[in-house]
Amino acid sequence: MQDAWTTVRYLDGYTRDVSGNSGRVAITVWPDGRARVEYRIKANSTLIVFERALAAWVLPELLLQLRETGFPALPKHKAGPHDRMGLLSVATATGMLQAWILPAHRQMPAVNHSILLLEAIASALSGGSLVAYGALERPVLAS
């Protein structure tokens, strides 16, 4: 029997990056349908937090897409020196499943859809202020 998946968390970006990029986004989706986006530009900067309830379809869709990827057993890829990486975590009743998401993984449709959905949540919660993230056709926030 598969352990029940509960909370999903995705970390994207860095607060200290040797290539000059900065900004870290943490996206958390809880089993009760709430989501939080935390954004910090630099390690010692102000933490900006957005939190709201999601539309009922979001978490089931996200978990379905992650299961279709085979998460956390994603194919092994070597990260390039300037590759954008994210850390995806899913809490279970007995522990935590984690995988690094590399650009090569985003070539897989289910992985790409999962990350696009998480990015759409970040965009919607922040009112579009996280401009690198686009929105989806379906609204992700509860009415």
Image (tube, grey):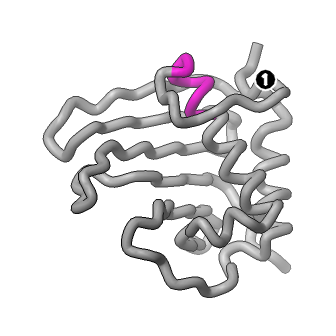
Quadrant the N terminus occupies: bottom right
Question: Who's the residue at 70% across and 29% down the image?
Answer: 135
Quadrant the C terminus occupies: top right
Relative side of 79 to 5, left or right: left
Question: Who's the residue at 19% across and 46% down the image?
Answer: 43
- Element under label 1? loop
Question: Who's the residue at 52% across and 43% down the image?
Answer: 27
Question: Who's the residue at 71% across and 62% down the image?
Answer: 5
Residue 47, horizontal then vertical, whole percent: 28, 32
Location of residue 6 by image quarter: bottom right
Location of residue 139 by image quarter: top right
Q: Around disc 1, counting alpha carbons within 10 Å, would you say few (fewer than 14), some (14 to 19), or many (20 or more)?
A: some
Magenta: predominant secondary structure element?
Answer: helix
Residue 129 sits above or below residue 133 on the image: above
Residue 119 sits above or below residue 3 on the image: above
In magenta, the rendered stretch is 121-128
Residue 12, horizontal then vertical, whole percent: 46, 52
Relative side of 21 to 114, left or right: left
Viewer-side residue, 19 vs 136? 19
Location of residue 35 by image quarter: top right
Numbered label tally:
1
Amino acid on which the number 1 mark rests in the picture: Pro
Residue 30, horizontal then vertical, whole percent: 62, 43
Q: Is residue 102 magenta?
A: no
Residue 76, horizontal then vertical, whole percent: 61, 87
Q: Residue furthest left?
A: 44
Residue 14 sits above or below residue 31 on the image: below
Q: Is residue 124 magenta?
A: yes
Residue under pointer 1: 139
Relative side of 90 to 3, left or right: left
